[in-house]
Structure formats: C-alpha cells, structure tokens
Image (cartoon, grey):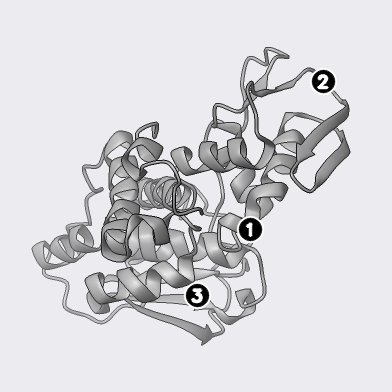
C-alpha cells in the first residue's frame, strides 16, 4: 500500500471546542437542568450519542494483547462505526475514560475523517484496526487527540470548577505549599488528609467530587482538577506533570512506535474551557 492515512487537521483548541460542543449538544437534547446533574457516560451515550451518531458499543469481548504483550483496553472500527471495550473493564475505574477515548475521541471526533481517508486511499478490506494504514507519527497524533477530547468531554473545566466551588464553598483556591496536613471543609463535615505532593492534593479534591462525573476515576479527574482555578501549586515547579492529560488506552499506554435546577447557566459554566 503506497498511501497512508493522514492526521486529522485538528488544532488543540478545535479538539477542546468539539468536546465541549458534545456536552452542549447533550444539554440541548435533555435540558440544562438534567445535564447539570452529572456528567455520566452511560446516560449521555444512551440518550444522545447513540441516537445522534449511531455508534455501536460492544463490551463483552476479550480484546487480547498487542504485539508487545500489553492488554488492549479498547479500539475503534471506523468502517463499521463500532467501538469495542475490553470485557475486563466492566468493574474497572478505567472504563469510563476508555469509553470517552474510544467513543468520543476516535468515533465522534475522528470517525468521519478516518472514513474519508480510507476511501481516499481505496481501502476496502475489513480491518479490525487502522494501525497498518498509518505511520507511527499519525497513530500518536490520533491517540493524543483522543485523550484530549476524552479529558474535556468527561470533565469540562467549567463543570469541574463549578463542582469544586459548590462542594467546598470556596472563596479562594486551595494552595499547595508542600507536603503536609490539609483541611477539606464539606457540607458533611471537615476532613483532614495527609498530602504528599500536588498531584495527591488534586486527587484528594477529585475524590470528594467524583460522584458528579459518572464513575470517572479519581486519577483521571485529578488531572482536570489540576487545571481548574480552585487549586494552585505555589512551590513554583518548572514543569507541572499534570498540565497534559496523559492517560493511555492499553495497560501500559500507547507507544510512540505503534445539580441543582437553579444551577449556573450552562453557557456561563462552560465559557471557561481552554
């Protein structure tokens, strides 16, 4: 095969915009009050994604391992508009992000582009994956875009900010000043946690708001908390490892080589997305 799939021409801002528009579309479909209750992949898929995008989601297969022996968590078949999620994730907290990655990032964001590219290069065989049709650089681009889309669809930063402020009734952000004991004031009472580092602080905050994000793991939500306006790292690290969302879709990750009814207006809530 002489020609290969080209990377989608999506900028970072375009990917984020389209992820945010997915939630807006869902809110228009079910009503703002309902949408503001929580961001739950299962509900959004059933009520909005499947009716609009007609993506088949199959979760009862063992997807095996890749060529390096790493467990495959999910993959997307563009020619059939079909997503597979490994059956081992049924009770695994990684399932939610994996679903957003495959269904949102690959199928919704990149699906039309991949089908157009397959048609352009005359690919008519039924492949289980597009990997043989792309270079490692293109595969890496697709994975990074899907991760970025999934992060912003699963936890739009405006919704994260809103939930943190409501849960802790904050007037100023939590400030990470170094390892130590931190106080978290909730409506259910005050909690004290020993915090090891900035990532741990973000995960602690994520733990107290995770029930509004449909089972998204604390670790995944913690990345978005780190980007919110309600937590600040005052230790002046040169590089914050949480500034890029880095979850991967194999057990070790992709490789370079291969609610209230009177809640804030939805438009205002999402206006802070980056």
Q: Quadrant of the N terminus?
A: bottom left
Residue occupied by mark 3: 85
Q: CA distance from mark 3 to mark 1?
A: 22 Å
Are the residues at dot 3 and dot 1 in contact (C-beta closer than 8 Å)?
no
Mark 3 or mark 1: which comes first in sequence?
3
Residue occupied by mark 1: 211
Are the residues at dot 1 and dot 2 in contact (C-beta closer than 8 Å)?
no
Q: CA distance from mark 1 to mark 2?
A: 27 Å
Mark 2 or mark 3: which comes first in sequence?
3
Are the residues at dot 2 and dot 3 in contact (C-beta closer than 8 Å)?
no
Q: How many numbered marks appear?
A: 3
Of 39 and 92, nearer the camera is 39
Q: CA distance from mark 2 to mark 3?
A: 39 Å
Tell me, for residue 264, which label it has, or none: none
Image side of residue 259 versus residue 47, left or right: right
Q: Residue furthest front?
A: 262
Residue 91 locus on image (x, y percent):
67, 75
Image side of residue 181 versus residue 177, left or right: right
Element class at badge 3: strand
Residue 245 locus on image (x, y percent):
53, 41
Residue occupied by mark 2: 178
Residue 86 locus on image (x, y percent):
55, 77
Examine the rendering and report whether any part of residue 133 can be seen. Answer: no
Element class at badge 1: helix
């Amino acid at each position: 095969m002489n020609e290969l799939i080209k990377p989608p021409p999506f900028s970072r801002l375009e990917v984020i915009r389209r992820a945010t528009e997915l939630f807006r579309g869902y809110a228009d479909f079910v009503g703002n009050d309902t949408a503001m209750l929580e961001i739950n992949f299962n509900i959004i898929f059933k009520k909005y994604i499947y009716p609009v995008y007609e993506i088949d989601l199959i979760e009862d297969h063992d997807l095996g391992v890749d060529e390096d022996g790493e467990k495959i968590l999910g993959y997307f078949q563009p020619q059939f508009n079909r997503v597979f999620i490994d059956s081992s994730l049924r009770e695994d907290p990684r399932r939610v992000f994996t679903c957003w990655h495959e269904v949102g990032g690959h199928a919704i964001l990149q699906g039309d582009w991949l089908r157009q590219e397959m048609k352009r290069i005359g690919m008519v065989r039924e492949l289980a994956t597009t990997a043989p049709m792309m270079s490692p650089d293109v595969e890496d681009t697709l994975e990074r875009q899907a991760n970025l889309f999934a992060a912003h669809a699963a936890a739009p930063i405006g919704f994260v900010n809103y939930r943190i402020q409501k849960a802790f009734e904050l007037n100023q952000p939590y400030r990470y000043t170094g390892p130590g004991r931190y106080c978290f004031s909730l409506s259910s009472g005050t909690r004290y946690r020993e915090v090891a580092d900035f990532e741990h602080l973000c995960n602690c905050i994520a733990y107290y708001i995770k029930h509004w994000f449909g089972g998204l793991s604390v670790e995944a939500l913690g990345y978005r908390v780190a980007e919110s306006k309600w937590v600040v790292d005052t230790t002046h690290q040169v590089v914050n490892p949480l500034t890029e969302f880095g979850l991967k879709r194999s057990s070790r990750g992709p490789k370079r080589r291969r609610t209230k009814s009177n809640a804030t207006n939805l438009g205002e809530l999402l206006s802070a997305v980056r």
